[in-house]
Structure formats: C-alpha cells, structure tokens
Image (tube, rainbow, N blue to C red):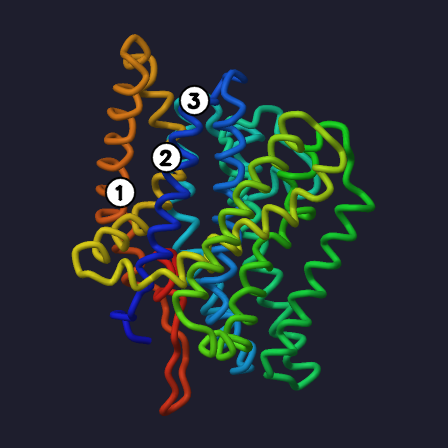
C-alpha cells in the first residue's frame, strides 16, 4: 500500500480544529461548572471526531469486506491498534502518575477500554477523554467484523448493501439506547457509554458510502450551488446542535437527550460534507501542508491536553485568561508536535500493509485523515 497517498487537507483541518476545540474548552470547564457554553462546544467537537472516524475508515472497511480474506481484517485491526493504543497508554500512564492512580483498578479498566462499556465502572474518572476512545476502540472490533461477515454470508459487495448494514447497525444501537438508557445522570450513563454510543461512528461510514453511491448526482448541480447548500446545512446543524446539546447535557431535558445522538450525528456529517465540498479552498501548498500538520498532531493534543492543564494551569492562573490560553495552546502545539514526530510517526512507519491482489490498489483512509 503506497505511503504517499493523497490527503484531503480540509478534513485534516477538521480533525485538528476539533482536537483544539476540546483542549481549549477543557481548560475552562475542567473542575468548573461556570462555562456551560464551553462544555457544549467541547461535547459537539467530540461528536465530529466520531463521525469523521467512521468516514475516513470506510474505504478500509469496504476493502476488507469486498476482499473477503480474514487476513486483511486482521491487518485493519492491527493498524488501528498500532495507531491508537501506544499513544493512549503513554498518556494514561502520565495522567495516572499525576493523579496518583497508577496500577489502581480504575487504571486497568482504562487500559482495557472497559471503564464505560455498559456503565461507568470507575470510582474516579480521572482521564476524562477516555470514554470517547473506548467508543472508538470497540467500534474497530465490532462494526468492521459485522460488515465483513454480512458481506460473506449474503455474498454482496454493492454499496447499497453496505448502506443497509450500516443503517441496521445504527437502528439496533438506537433501540438499545431507547430501551435501556436512563434519564437520571444521562450524560454519564448514556451519552458516554460504549454500548449506547458506538453507532455515532457508524454514521460516518454511512455518509461515506452514500457519497460514493450517490455522489455522481451532485455533479449535475453547479458547484457554487452545492457549496452554498452544504454550508447552509452545516450552519443550521451547528445552531441546532448547540441548542440541543445545551438542553440535553446542561439543562437535562429528556426530549433533547433522546434526540441528541441524531442531532450530533447530523452536525458531524454536515461538518464533514461542508469541508469536503470546500476542499479546493485548501489546495494551495502552504495551506495544505498546515492542514495536514494540524491533523497529524490532533491525536496527541486530544490525549495529553488534560495532563498539560494539570501541569500548567497552577502557574498560569494569575495571568489574564487570554494570556493563559495562548501559553497553554502553544504548549499543546509544541508537546504534540514532538510527540508525533518522535513517538507516533515511527510506529506508523512499521504498520503492516494490506494484502492486495495483483493489479489491485487501495485508496486508504490516509487520504482523509492522519489517523489511518
């Protein structure tokens, strides 16, 4: 599989922007309830991560399912684990040392991504971003295998078939959430629970397959019209998402809680669609390189920003808030850049490659995201 795969710079920008949105929002809201707007923005940014993950991994999942060889499904999992688990473990050990939680029961539940599998099992949720990482990891081992098995059993490789599989997966998880989800402490016991939220990544897969299946019809519409339409949908979904998130998570309205997963998915899908359609804006070499770099450091920003807050905020808190954010953001950039190039990148270079049949090529998710 070629290593110099073309990337979509706009989606790298989305990933980087989402990571820094979470990091900066958490600087305000960590150990504080005085910043409800920042909390809502952070929660929506995580939902963008979910949908983007499904979207960028869809080409690999489709390839494995159509190829039909179990070896490539194993390669997919190995590549994901090598990309996500080593940095996660380093960040977990670091935050555990800072909070005196190393080798505790909570620590080991984080290690195996089970602290929020069916409920909140940890006594202290000291690594706040880990809930979303558990959702991601369990998606990797369930959804691709489901698609692979369905393709083999029904002997199907058409895109419409994969649309139905994804839609069915989303419907099953939605039913579980509606039947077994609770309204008391909904944020902790539903929104952050793997079995109730794993469908959020499936929406990204669904978006990719639908774009691939029906994308040609967009070419019949003038480009400026499609760009305006997608941007208008994005703005509408952003406003609705911010409103529903505030009512669901902060105010605790039950109706908003029930519709939050759908509104969040719509926001994530509209964000990806809008920036994907506007990719030509980011085609210049200098802008494209910045976007790619932004995407590359996003995972370490997401993983380590809480550690950096704990280390930096006691020293910075006497300064004006704008100065605090500037220094903190700069610290995130410097640390994440060093961590990517000296820790993450060497691991990415030795990941296994997919087993391709003679004459076959694979457009990997690397063209869409830095976490492929």
Across and down, in percent, residue 242 comes to 56, 37
Residue at 80 percent of width and 43 percent of height: 180
Horizontal side of 366 relative to 230 (left or right) equals: left
Mark 3 vs mark 2: in front: 3
Q: Identify the image quadrant of residue 241.
A: top right
**In the depicted structure, whether residue 36 falls above or below residue 160:** above
Pick whichever, 45 or 280, lies toward us.
280
Q: Secondary structure at mark 1?
A: helix
Q: Secondary structure at mark 2?
A: helix
Mark 2, residues whose alpha carbon is within 10 Å: few (<14), some, or many (≥20)? Answer: many
- Image quarter in which the N terminus is found: bottom left
- Residue identified by numbered label 3: 28
Across and down, in percent, residue 209 comes to 55, 71
How far is mark 3 from mark 2, CA to CA?
A: 16 Å
**In the depicted structure, whether residue 119 falls above or below residue 351:** above
**In the depicted structure, whether residue 21 falls above or below residue 200:** above
Q: Secondary structure at mark 3?
A: helix
Residue at 27 percent of width and 47 percent of height: 340
Mark 3, residues whose alpha carbon is within 10 Å: few (<14), some, or many (≥20)? Answer: some
- Image quarter in which the C terminus is found: bottom left
- Residue identified by numbered label 1: 339
- Residue identified by numbered label 2: 304
Residue at 39 percent of width and 33 percent of height: 23
The total of numbered circles placed on residues is 3
| N-term-proximal mark, 1 vs 3 | 3
How far is mark 1 from mark 3, CA to CA?
A: 24 Å
């Amino acid at each position: 599989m070629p290593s110099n795969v073309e990337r979509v710079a706009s989606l790298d920008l989305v990933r980087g922007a989402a990571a820094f949105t979470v990091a900066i929002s958490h600087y305000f809201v960590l150990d504080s309830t005085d910043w409800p707007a920042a909390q809502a923005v952070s929660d929506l940014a995580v939902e963008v991560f979910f949908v983007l993950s499904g979207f960028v991994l869809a080409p690999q999942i489709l390839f494995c399912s159509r190829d039909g060889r179990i070896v490539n499904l194993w390669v997919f999992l190995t590549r994901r684990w090598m990309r996500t688990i080593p940095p996660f473990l380093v960040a977990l050990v670091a935050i555990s040392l800072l909070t005196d939680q190393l080798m505790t029961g909570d620590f080991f539940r984080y290690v195996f991504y089970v602290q929020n599998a069916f409920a909140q099992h940890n006594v202290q949720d000291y690594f706040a971003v880990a809930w979303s990482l558990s959702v991601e990891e369990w998606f990797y081992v369930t959804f691709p295998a489901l698609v692979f098995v369905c393709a083999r059993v029904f002997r199907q490789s058409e895109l419409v078939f994969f649309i139905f599989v994804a839609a069915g997966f989303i419907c099953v998880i939605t039913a579980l959430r509606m039947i077994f989800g609770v309204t008391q402490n909904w944020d902790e016991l539903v929104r952050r629970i793997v079995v109730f939220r794993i469908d959020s990544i499936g929406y990204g897969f669904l978006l990719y397959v639908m774009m691939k299946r029906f994308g040609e019809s967009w070419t019949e519409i003038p480009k400026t019209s499609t760009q305006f339409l997608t941007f208008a949908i994005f703005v509408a979904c952003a406003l609705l998402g911010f409103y529903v998130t505030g009512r669901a998570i902060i105010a605790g309205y039950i109706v908003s809680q029930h519709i939050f997963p759908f509104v969040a998915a719509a926001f994530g899908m509209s964000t990806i669609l809008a920036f994907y359609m506007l990719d030509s804006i980011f085609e210049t070499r200098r802008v494209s390189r910045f976007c790619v770099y932004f995407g590359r450091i996003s995972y370490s920003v997401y993983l380590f920003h809480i550690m950096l807050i704990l280390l930096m905020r006691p020293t910075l808190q006497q300064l004006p808030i704008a100065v605090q954010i500037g220094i903190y953001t700069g610290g995130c950039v410097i640390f994440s850049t060093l961590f990517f190039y000296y820790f993450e990148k060497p691991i990415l270079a030795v990941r296994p490659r997919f087993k391709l049949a003679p004459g076959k090529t694979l457009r990997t998710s690397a063209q869409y995201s830095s976490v492929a």
